[in-house]
Image (cartoon, grey):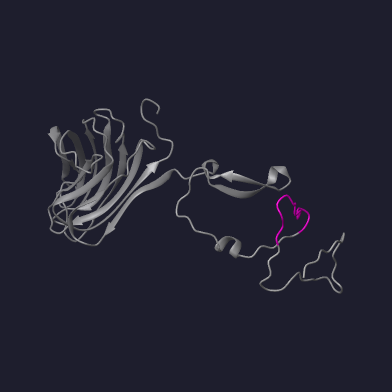
Amino acid sequence: MSSEIKADKWSPASGTSATIGDSGDTFTVPSGVTLDTSSSTLTLPSSAITGQTAITSLADSDKFLVSDASDSGNLKYVEKQYLPSGTFVKVGDVRSNSAAGSHDLTGIFSDTYDKYFFSLSTFPITAGQYIYMQFLDGSNNPLTSGYYGVAWGREQGPDNATQNYTFSGSTSAIKLNDSTSNDRAWQGQGYITGPTSGLASNKAVTWQQASYNSDNDMISMVGGFTNVLSTDATGLRIYSGVNLTAISLQVYGIVDTKHYNGS
């Protein structure tokens, strides 16, 4: 049986509440019909949000519904690309408690950023070791030449000795330290510049570090290395002469940093 109700207004027979239909019923608003709730309160079920498919990343054109305070609270949308963002965007993260000779972060560098911040904590399985960093090319092969650099620091110990090293000729990797303890982590933070610029002599790494040597004396150092190869680098490798017992490495792209040519 079908019928049509024509009325200018529906009101509760008594009180201030009324119900349309029964559980399981479906009411369809046809195409072209305007359901105007602009002057009323419309309560949506939580499933209007939680019942939708979840996404794990946002595209610049993804939209958010907002109430525009500058336009009497009227509903509008804003795209993700116009929302404020942080200065650092995480592009790579490796954390492991398994011993390994090296750890790679691949596909982390691109033309989106020219400068990156990194934070590294690790320690070799035996004392008195060096920690190295290498760039990886687009096929995840290490760049094993063209590194030049220097580091300088002081030892807080009985002799308060100066710690420094210099590579005046090309070497195969960036040397991050002068010695390690086997029971205290090496800690360092720094910046990486120009890994995908395609320009020779433009890839650079600067860092500061605090660690302990094989005598468990604290050493504080700063250092800087460049790589003179024009090969674009898309990743990083951290390694030592022995296994690293654990590692925590995070790399962040720095927003709005540009290449020297402005691109």
Vertical side of 88 occupied by 244: above or below: below
* Residue pictured at 12% horizontal, 53% vertical: 128
Vertical side of 88 occupied by 2: above or below: below
Span colored in magenta: 28-40
Question: Quadrant of the image for the C terminus?
Answer: top left
Q: Quadrant of residue 171?
A: top left
Main secondary-structure element of the magenta-colored stretch:
loop
Vertical side of 104 occupied by 202: above or below: above
Seen from this angle, which residue lies furthest front?
1
Which of the two residues, 190 or 67, is positioned nearer the viewer here? 67
Relative image position of residue 82 (x, y in whole percent): 54, 41
Relative image position of residue 63 (x, y in whole percent): 56, 47
In the rendered image, residue 23 lying in the magenta stretch gets the answer no
- Asked whether, in this view, residue 251 is left or right of residue 66, the answer is left
Relative image position of residue 209 (x, y in whole percent): 26, 47
Relative image position of residue 225 (x, y in whole percent): 22, 36
Q: Quadrant of residue 125?
A: bottom left
